[in-house]
Amino acid sequence: MNIQVKQVNRFFMLATAPFFGLFIALLLGSVHLNWEGQQVALPEPKELNQHVTSLSQGLTNAEETAKYTISTIRKTSLLYQKTTSAMSQIVTSASSASRRPEMIYDHRITAKFGTAPFETVQSDKIRIELYKINPGNYKGYAMKIKLKTPSAMKMAVAGDKLGAAETTMQAVKHSGAVAGINAGGFADSGGKRYPLSTTILNGKYLTGFEPSYKDLSFVGLNQSGKLIGGKFSSQDQLDRLKPAFGATFVPVLLQNGSKTPIPAKWITSPYRAPRTVIGSYRDDQLLVLVVDGYDEKGGSGASLPELQDKLYNLGVQSAYNLDGGGSTSLILNGRVINKPSDGSLRPVPTHFLFFK
């Protein structure tokens, strides 16, 4: 700021130099000038001195004004910087405070796994944490997923057409997904595999709406990225949830934080098996459970009541059983995580995929 004041002083000195020169000349005496034969009388020294004094005072006032203006600008600049810094701190504190309940809840549900994740995926679209689960009766994996944007999860239909089938690894690779699981059930017909009942892809019904019958239920994601599911008697009832995609299988395990009755048929047929289950927490994070088993004959894997208890104890609010047995598959970072009971991945019509 001192440099600016010096620049202002230099400017005024240069501007007033001619006037001071004239003043000195006039002090030498009374001066008269001839201008084409006419005499022009210059002011008397006393009168000129008054003008110079007035001009000098004006210059002094101007200099003081400049100094005050520069000082004011500097103070305003400092105040602006302090205000901006204070506002940034307020925004940071408010943002941190708003996330605190979310962080506390996440810590609470994560602690229930009793161990740290052994693999993590983190991006601006998604966060995935992979845990091992081994309560003694079965072995498997829990994949906790936070969708930071709805586009981080999609459903793939093999070959983008009905009747086709592919493995979850194939679906992950050609779509560029970071993770994937098998989705809904299917029916074989004429050498082709068709998704069971109501199936929605990109907001459109692939074969029209079919009211829920027997023990079947729909599960998928809505346009806001939240898990939706259950039994639906009319298309309007499902449309009100604005589904983006979804598939069908059986049965529902949890709804609104409560256990739902498991049909007797599905408790015993088979009693134990490889399983794939998807659920959601209160904060809309997803949880996928994938359980290993060596076959589909009921002697290995987990029972549905066991998984229902596990999900409930983990704090899951809603949960839906997906196709299991040889269809069960979990892919993460280009690897098959589970041990498929068929010895290799089974081609199926639908897959739930996750993207970075």
Image (tube, helix red, strand yellow):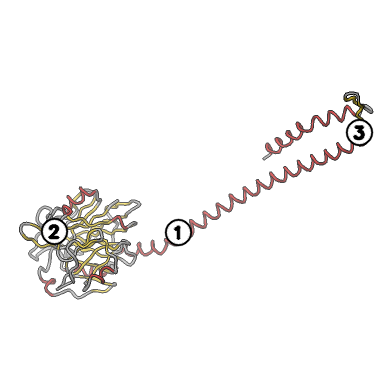
**Mark 3 element type:** loop
The mark found on residue 327 in the picture is 2
Q: Quadrant of residue 243?
A: bottom left
Residue on which the image places disc 3: 43
The mark found on residue 96 in the picture is 1
**Image location of residue 94, percent across then percent down:** 48, 60
The crowd level at tag 2 (other Cα within 10 Å; few <14, some 14-19, many 20+) is many
Which of discs 2 and 3 lies nearer the camera? The answer is 3
**Label 2 vs 3, first from the N-terminus:** 3
> Looking at the image, do the residues carrying marks 3 and 1 touch, with CB atoms under 8 Å apart?
no
**Mark 1 element type:** helix
**Label 1 vs 2, first from the N-terminus:** 1
Q: Quadrant of residue 96?
A: bottom left
Q: Which amino acid, mark 1?
A: Ser
Report the front residue among 96 and 199. Answer: 199
**Mark 2 element type:** helix
